[in-house]
Amino acid sequence: MQIRYRRVLCTLGLILGICGLNRPVLASFPDRPVTLTVPVGPGGGTDLLARQLAKTLSQKWKQPVVVENRTGAAGIIGAEYVMKQAADGYNLLLSHDGVFTATPILYKRPDFKPLEHLAPISEVAIQPYVAVVNPSVPVKTMAGLIALIKRMNKEKKPFGFATSALGSADHMAGEKFQLACGVHMLIVPYKSTAPAITDVAGGHVPFGFFSPAAALPLIKSGTLRALAITTPHRSDLVPGLPTVAETLPGYHANAWFGVWAPAGTPAPILNQISKDIAMAVKTPEMAKLMKLNGLAPATSSPSEFAAFIKQDAAHTAELIRRAHIKVQ
């Protein structure tokens, strides 16, 4: 009886000790600089989003949030770097969706398991795409584009589709388009958005899906012709532009961005960072940046974000299977 009583006291003491430890740790977080890793190069939309978020969180936390670009291998290098850091909330990853959906399937690395080795914190933003063609392409609507591609398929002539990278969200948008309307396009992959959209503007490739931030300046200058946007409903990002869904009912496509920490990071810290991100995206500075870059704010709790990633990863896996997508 005395031994059992001691065990109860020890267990109670352990529980109280853990609770006592969590309170000061959370209350003082962060008490030193935080690193926010971005798995793409500087200057692009993901990098700009990370830098504005870092600036806003720095003001909130009264601690520097330092952005580091670690590029390569379709985002794997940056993600793996964060996986190997201490699980204490001081090393975070801001990434696009592809690292967690298409990349683990297409780039066969048995040891790369981001869904297991990184803890979701919050979604940050979503980004639709604008379907654009070179002005020399004799179509002005998605229906006209589909008819043209079908005619070229029948004549066994290639019709090119430019994508920023194999496995990217814009690539997935193109594959989804092919399946939805029963056409075949020649996928032309690039290393980033800039050379891809440059070649469509130059007439080397006729068609592509690009972010509003990349496409709108060229659309306004007449260098590209916009056909539709991939949002479920018409968007203020490109006023008056039809949706792809108006031609292909049910079609929509977008990229999304979020923040992760190494797996094992304490739940109270994950929850606190998630709440602070939700606060950050509501600031006028973040709202302005998102609007300029064709993004819409989207935040979530760690559990909501985890469920969303799981669902989207399953959807992407099915799309890759149906489209027979492979990386050579």
Image (spheres, grey):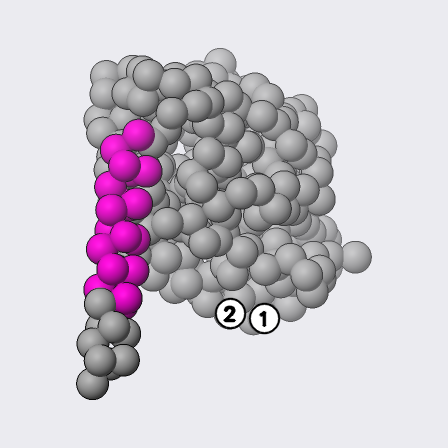
Q: Which of the pair 4/287 is nearer the observer?
A: 4
Q: Residue 12 lies in magenta, yes or no?
A: yes
Task: Find disc 2 in the rendering and name its residue.
Answer: 318
The residue under label 1 is 321
Give the vertical position of 102 relative to 60 (above or below). below
Residue 245 percent location from the top left of the image:
33, 52
Kindly identify the amino acid type of the residue bearing the numbered disc 1: Arg
Kindly report the distance in space between the C-alpha atoms of the residues bearing marks 1 and 2: 5 Å
Residue at x 54% of width, y 32% of height = 37
Instruction: Report the residue at 37% width, 57% height from top.
Output: 306
**Amino acid at dot 2:** Glu
Q: Residue at x 50, y 21 (%)?
A: 66
Element at label 1: helix
Question: Does 147 lie within the magenta span?
Answer: no
The location of residue 300, given as percent across then percent down, is 27, 46
Please indicate whether residue 129 sits to the left or right of residue 307 in the image.
right
Q: Which residues make up the magenta segment? A: 10-28
Q: Where does the image place residue 233, in percent across and percent down from the top left? A: 25, 45
